[in-house]
Image (spheres, grey):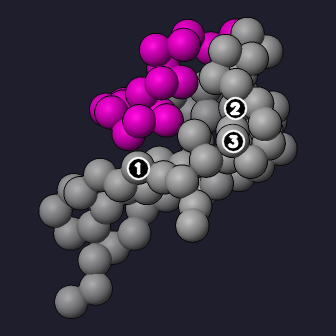
Amino acid sequence: MEKMTKVDVGNGEYRFKLEGLLDKKQISKNKLMRDTETDFKVIQRIAKGTITKVDIYVLARICDYLDCSITDIIDYQKKKN
C-alpha cells in the first residue's frame, strides 16, 4: 500500500504522497531540501498534508528533481456518491 496522507475537503480529498515517493526513491527530506533549495518546513507541510497554499515553482523544482509529475506528489479524488 502506498504511503500517503489524506485530507478531507468536503466533496473529495487531497492525497499527499511526497513521503511515500521519497521512501520509494530512498531520498531524505533533508537531501530534497538541500538539492532543491526548498525550505524544510514547506517540504514537511507537503509531506504531511498541512500545506494551505501551493507554490507552483516549488512543486516544479520537486517534480524536476524527483523526475515525476505533480500528481505523483499531490492529487485530488472526488468522493463517489
Mark toward the viewer: 2 or 3: 3
Q: Is residue 28 magenta?
A: no
Residue 54 in view (yes/no): no
Instruction: Please state the horizontal and vertical placement of residue 61, each as a whole percent of the image.
Output: 72, 28
Residue density around tag 3, few if under 14, some if 14–19, many if 20 or more, within 10 Å? few
Residue 39 in magenta? yes
Amino acid tagged 1: Thr
> Helix or strand or loop: what does disc 1 sit on?
strand
User: Which residue lies at the image location 67% right of the left edge and 15% below the top edge?
Assistant: 30
Q: CA distance from mark 2 to mark 1?
A: 18 Å
Q: Which residue is mark 2?
A: 62
Q: Is label 3 in contact with label 1 (beta carbons under 8 Å)?
A: no
Q: How many marks?
A: 3
Given residues 17 and 59, the one toward you in this image is 17
Look at the numbered disc 3 and give the secondary structure of its residue. helix
| Residue range (magenta) | 36-54
The earlier-in-sequence mark between 3 and 1 is 1
Residue at the disc numbered 1: 5
> What crowding class fits label 1: few (fewer than 14 Cα within 10 Å), some (14-19), or many (20 or more)?
some
Mark 3 → mark 1, Cα distance in angstroms: 14 Å
Question: For mark 2, does the 10 Å Cα neighbourhood hold few (<14), some (14 to 19), or many (20 or more) residues?
Answer: many
Residue 23, label in figure: 3
As drawn, which residue projects farthest toward the bottom? 81
Residue 39 — which label?
none
Residue 45: image quadrant is top left
